Image (cartoon, coloured by chain):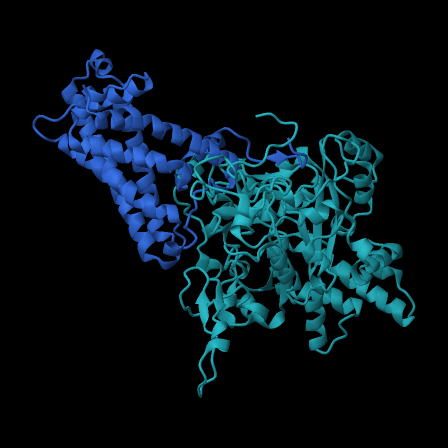
């Protein structure tokens, strides 16, 4: 057993109103630079819908994730030989059109247009070639099912279901799915990177791109089945969601979590057995992947496991954080949260509590009491289509875990309504979903009240190998290879601040005065001799 | 007695170029590792690239292999292997010509793509304005030199250019070997030296990034936050 720790996320989809605050704050923090105009580390898509980039879930086309070949786990996009053979043109790279062509507006026209009878207009202009353009697609073009049923037809999850289901389904419900990088236990983006620039951090499991090692081969973009690695077309480097590691290292939640108005995101530590990851990702049946991943997680309350964790160099405060982890409660204890597309075999670590509200809405809409447990349980059973769709998203098509999670949510709803209305309580409601009254209340507290300090249990960082937490010096964004947040490309790869010279003092071969080495090299560091 | 210009061109210049190439690459790697990238524009245009990219690069790999064979292996070695000059020459003409044509076709397609696709055109760097004409010129001069091999009494570059090339590394440049070479060979060599000069300061550095280690490394990489 090799115990490793991962900071994981759970999103409660019942609470997502699709306001895109997470996307916007993330973009302002990380990708408001040229070259990343089209990049959304966090995006919110309407389901059913095509998602972003369009139809990214169609792995027949994009070949992301892993597949079993003769019982062995191989990146679906091909093994090492095929990757190297396709080095000079990546056949599965999405084009900018699959995301959208970024644009801006000629705002200046509004002020500088000469006086005339017509109202001046700000016309759209492409951000890639600088020419006037027509806007035909954007990051959320089909938001809230905008654009009509033809966009629904492009949903790969719906396409896997049959047509009658699809028509019925369109009347049934709609929900929002916020997505970030899954920071997988078995990341296929890392596996397909020829340069070895992508890596999974030992301490917290965050998957990052080393900007100084990335050589722009673009394999990671096609290798990631969630299409959450992006290519910066200005710098020629891959970039991806960083799980806001500078914040997480300091014990703070990610920007998307912090700013979520629906308080639907949960952050916490999961302990897992790294030795089991390979086996779990390679179980033959796709529907067995969800239980297999559950089997990788370790119980920090077990003293044996706590001891093994300490031996693996995980500090004590991380183990206590794992015990208090809301993510662990939702994933392992209550079995409410489910992984997104486990069939990609990457063992994703951002999980989702499936939405019950569409079922309640469908019931209320048909004149029934949407919170009566008997009605709800029957409806979950009868509303086959939403359950089947959710199963297509979260359990590789197995409806049982989705139904179980929805029934638990339904039971909690009914139970708490009785409590709030002062009605006699019925212990059978909790018992029917395998829980007791105490856990009902705990679940309610975690899901409905969702206190800040209970949603985010993030211990501060440490250095692997040393059991004591190390003090963090400076901002880790300044570290070599750390993606900064500065607006221009020049500053993006500036040397660490300690070494940074005033820009005016720097010289390259074009501005070199030809006499001395002033400005050509960074100043000597004390204590090093060259 | 060599003409001073010949000595400068074939006895001094190669060392200046080599120094600049090595020192420039080291300097770039040390201070601009972030700049080591293919700067791919596939995101903007994929159709033409999917043909032109592999055509150019694979052609180039053959061309480089051919150059290494021709320049580094002395004629006496192949004769010891009972490969006659005629056979060798014919092979190099056919294989080299085919590889050169594939490379040129690939480059033409890529240049057309770069000029005709507005977003790719806009993504062009300043060094590219120098690099692309130079690359085309080197390639054309080289192809012309190969084509002259089809003449009745072709120039045996392995007795001229190759001798000069190897003599450079013996630190005893054989200047006459080069001055007696046909003009197109000398032009090709001069342009190639210009290319090597530009190399460290252009996108050509991505050639150093050839990911050979990928073939032998494990799929998943773990790294510690603590810098090693």
Q: Quadrant of the C terminus of chain A?
A: top right
**Percent x, y of residue A192:** 51, 40
Q: Is residue A168 visible?
A: no
Q: Quadrant of the N terminus of chain A?
A: top right
- Residue drawn where x is 50% and y is 28% of the image: B216
**Percent x, y of residue A109:** 47, 75
- Residue furthest top in the image: B80
**Percent x, y of residue A397:** 60, 54
User: Nearest the camera: A213 or A115?
Assistant: A115
**Percent x, y of residue A247:** 71, 49
Q: How many marks?
A: 0
Q: Is residue B10 visible?
A: yes
Q: Colour of chain A?
A: cyan
- Residue drawn where x is 36% and y is 28% of the image: B18
- Residue furthest bottom in the image: A117
Q: Which chain is blue?
A: B
- Residue drawn where x is 30% and y is 49% of the image: B111
Quarter assignment of residue B151: top left
User: Nearest the camera: A183 or B195?
Assistant: B195
- Residue furthest left in the image: B152
* Figure check: B129 above or below A405: above
Q: Is residue A167 left or right of residue A441?
A: left
Q: Is residue A350 left or right of residue A492?
A: right
User: Nearest the camera: A108 or A11?
Assistant: A108
User: Nearest the camera: B17 or A210?
Assistant: B17
């Amino acid at each position: 057993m090799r115990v490793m720790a991962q900071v994981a996320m759970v999103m409660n989809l019942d609470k997502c109103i699709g306001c895109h605050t997470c996307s916007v704050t993330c973009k302002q923090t990380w990708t408001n630079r040229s070259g990343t105009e089209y990049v959304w580390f966090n995006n919110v898509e309407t389901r059913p819908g095509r998602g972003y980039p369009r139809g990214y879930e169609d792995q027949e086309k994009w070949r992301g994730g892993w597949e079993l070949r003769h019982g062995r786990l191989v990146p679906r996009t091909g093994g090492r030989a095929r990757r190297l053979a396709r080095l000079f043109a990546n056949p599965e790279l999405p084009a900018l059109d699959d995301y959208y062509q970024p644009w801006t507006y000629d705002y200046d026209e509004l002020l500088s247009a000469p006086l005339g009878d017509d109202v001046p207009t700000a016309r759209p202009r492409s951000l890639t070639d600088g020419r006037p353009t027509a806007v035909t697609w954007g990051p959320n073009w089909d938001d809230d099912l905008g654009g009509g049923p033809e966009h629904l037809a492009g949903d790969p999850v719906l396409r896997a279901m049959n047509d009658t289901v699809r028509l019925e389904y369109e009347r049934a419900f709609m929900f929002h799915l916020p997505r970030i990088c899954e920071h997988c236990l078995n990341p296929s983006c890392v596996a397909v990177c020829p340069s070895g620039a992508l890596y999974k951090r030992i301490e917290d499991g965050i998957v990052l791109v080393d900007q100084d090692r990335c050589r722009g081969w673009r394999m990671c973009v096609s290798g990631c089945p969630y299409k959450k690695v992006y290519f910066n077309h200005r710098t020629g480097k891959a970039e991806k969601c960083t799980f806001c590691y500078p914040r997480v290292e300091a014990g703070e939640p990610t920007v998307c979590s912090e700013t979520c108005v629906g308080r639907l995101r949960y952050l916490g530590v999961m302990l897992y057995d790294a030795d089991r990851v390979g086996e779990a990702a390679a179980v033959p049946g796709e529907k067995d992947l969800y239980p297999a991943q559950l089997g990788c997680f370790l119980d920090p309350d077990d003293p044996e496991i706590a001891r093994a964790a300490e031996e693996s160099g995980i500090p004590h405060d991380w183990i206590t954080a794992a015990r208090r982890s809301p993510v662990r409660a939702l994933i392992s204890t209550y079995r409410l949260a489910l992984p997104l597309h486990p069939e990609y075999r990457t063992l994703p670590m951002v999980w989702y509590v499936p939405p019950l509200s569409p079922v309640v809405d469908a019931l209320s809409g048909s004149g029934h009491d949407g919170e009566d447990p008997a009605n709800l349980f029957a409806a979950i059973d009868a509303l086959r289509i939403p359950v089947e769709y959710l199963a297509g998203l979260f359990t590789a098509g197995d409806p049982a875990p989705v139904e179980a999670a929805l029934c638990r949510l339904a039971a909690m709803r009914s139970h708490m309504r009785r409590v709030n209305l002062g009605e006699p309580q019925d212990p059978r409601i909790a018992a029917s979903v395998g829980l007791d009254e105490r856990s009902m209340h705990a679940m309610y507290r975690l899901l409905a009240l969702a206190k800040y300090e209970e949603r985010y249990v993030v211990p501060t960082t440490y250095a692997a190998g040393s059991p004591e937490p190390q003090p963090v010096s400076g901002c880790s964004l300044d570290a070599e290879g750390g993606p900064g947040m500065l607006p221009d490309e020049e500053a993006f790869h500036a040397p660490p601040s300690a070494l940074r010279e005033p820009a005016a003092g720097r010289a390259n071969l074009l501005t070199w005065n030809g006499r001395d080495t002033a400005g050509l090299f960074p100043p000597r560091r004390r204590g090093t001799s060259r | 007695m060599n003409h001073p210009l010949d000595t400068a061109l074939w006895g001094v210049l190669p060392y200046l170029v080599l120094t600049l190439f090595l020192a420039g690459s080291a300097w770039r790697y040390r201070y601009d590792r972030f700049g080591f990238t293919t700067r791919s524009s596939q995101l903007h245009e994929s159709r033409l690239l999917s043909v032109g990219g592999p055509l150019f690069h694979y052609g180039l790999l053959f061309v480089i292999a051919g150059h290494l064979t021709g320049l580094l292996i002395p004629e006496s070695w192949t004769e010891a292997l009972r490969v006659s000059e005629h056979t060798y020459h014919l092979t190099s003409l056919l294989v080299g010509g085919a590889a050169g044509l594939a490379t040129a076709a690939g480059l033409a397609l890529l240049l057309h793509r770069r000029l005709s696709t507005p977003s790719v055109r806009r993504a062009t760097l300043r060094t590219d304005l120098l690099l692309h004409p130079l690359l085309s010129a080197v390639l054309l001069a080289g192809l012309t030199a190969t084509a002259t091999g089809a003449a009745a009494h072709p120039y045996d570059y392995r007795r001229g250019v190759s001798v000069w090339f190897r003599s450079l590394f013996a630190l005893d440049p054989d200047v006459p070997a080069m001055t007696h070479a046909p003009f197109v060979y000398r032009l090709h060599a001069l342009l190639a030296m210009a290319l090597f000069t530009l190399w460290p300061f252009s996108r050509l550095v991505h050639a150093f990034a050839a990911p050979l280690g990928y073939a032998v490394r494990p799929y998943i990489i773990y790294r510690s936050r603590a810098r090693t």
